[in-house]
Amino acid sequence: MIDFWHFGVANTARFATATGQHLSLVITAVLLSILLAALITAGIDALQNNRQLKSNGRTPHAAHKLAESVQSSLAALYAVPSLALFALAIPLLGIGTATAIIVLVAYNQFLLVRNFSAGLASVDTGLYEAARSLGCTRLQAFTSVQLPLAAPILIAGVRLATISTIGIATIAALVDAGGLGALIFTGLRTNSLNLLLWATLLTMLLALFANAVLSLCERLFSRTTHGKCDTVNTDFSS
Amino acid sequence: MIHAIISYFDSSSAEYVHALWQHIAIAVAAVTLAIVAGFPLGVLSSRNRVARSIVTGTLSTLRVIPSLALLFLIVVLTGQVGFQVALFALTVLALPPVMINTTVAFSHLPPATVEAAEALGMSSFKIFWQVKLPLAAPVVFAGIKTATTEVIASATLAAFIGGGGLGTLIFTGLGLMRTDLLVIGGASVAALSLASLALLNLCERRLIPWKHLPS
């Protein structure tokens, strides 16, 4: 036990570098994932709510099918083990941090798109229409009505994706992306229990910390949006 | 690339079949062990409040440990490598999803249905097998599905600790920078994972046909 602490103190710089590397890998991957998932969700949403097709009285059957197949192929991608994805990515993209980030981003799409779609669907379309009829532009109605109301579900998706990315990023050490995974592999090779334990502990702490911070955001958003809704309602009645 | 893949199957198809078989064997063994141990423990812990909170709270926190770290920790702690250690590690990994889902399923049964069965004079043995188990089955099965996906993925990492399987191809490919091995290994693991999921979905529809009925 004392040995364990001594080891940690003696290698502080090494652990700090690895944790920093891990964190920057995860943050880059999660931010890019959110961007891509937002685009995919917008695409799916546009296909499913195609105004022109709806006003023609035609059910957008093909569009629905396409949106569904996008979601099921993302689910299939998510079911593929991460090491297999890394192995398949190396011949195409080579070795390095960029490969790791691309694989992590691909892996996150299922969780994020699922939650983003669910978040948008959870907002009453009546509220969006009301905002539009009050003179909001589409963008304004989206940013000031839909987005804040959907925020708790959107953030829940980001939270799940971040936790899973922190775990999978350890495997990214195999494609030379560094981070805490590199220490875990070194720990096995050199049979160093202390190194393994410290790297594991830091990965866990990172995941628990991300979970705590994002849970807090989730709760904060659900409170503010509920508050706003209440004031809007009383304004209308008076 | 395609030439390299074809020549690999030409020369080492026996080795490939062996790796595939090892992968399937270790995964099936680990999931079976996890069910045999996790299901009764889950049922028991659903009956006790303290045990329930330990299972749903502590075990889900432990799942934050990356599977890679858990696998390697077990190796360094036991000081051994090989099939048995890998099997043990994979079982440990598969246990939480099975146990958590069993506990949750059995502690959220509709009380009215269970009481109706009691009022009709069914023995507690009969109630368990004919009322509780069918009602809990969908959630329990979901846990088994999660465990299977996780075990097949982590069995790839088990190659690193001498557990054999398709991961061997990937690690050899990484070590020698043989992209043909990487593609064969990666594609096989991916296909195996998707196939197992399809198989489990089929089983689910056969075994629990009432899952999709409106409750």
Image (tube, rainbow, N blue to C red):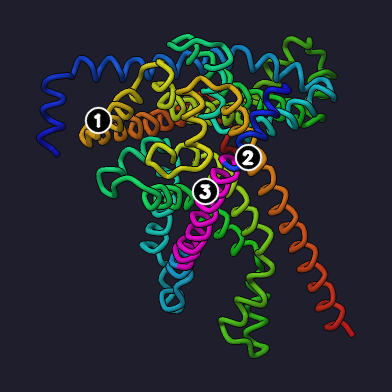
Query: Amino acid type of disc 3?
Result: Gln
Query: As rendered, which of B187 and A94 lies closer to the eye?
Result: A94
Q: Is residue A37 magenta?
A: yes
Q: Name the residue beneath numbered marker 1.
A: B176
Residue A10, picture quadrant: top right
Q: Is residue A231 magenta?
A: no
Kindly identify which numbered label has been placed on residue B60: none
Please rate how many residues cluster around mark 1, counting C-alpha atoms within 10 Å: few if below 14, some from 14 to 19, many from 20: few
Mark 2 = which residue? A12
Q: Residue at x 17, y 19 (%)?
A: B12
> Percent from the top left, x then y, of residue B74?
56, 18
Q: Is residue A36 above or below residue A106?
A: below
Is there a contact, CB below 8 Å, between mark 3 and mark 1?
no
Q: Which residues are magenta?
A: A14-42
Measured as percent of width and height from the top left, residue A201 is found at: 64, 34
**Residue at image mark 3:** A21
Say whether mark 1 and mark 3 are on the same chain: no
Q: Chain of mark 3?
A: A
In this view, A42 is above or below A72: below
Residue name at image x 51 percent, y 26 percent: A187
Location of the C terminus of chain A by quadrant is bottom right
Q: Position of residue A131 (x, y in %)?
A: 66, 82
* Residue B62: x %, y % from top left: 67, 30
Q: Amino acid at mark 2?
A: Thr
Image vertical order of residue A82 relative to residue A104, above or below: above
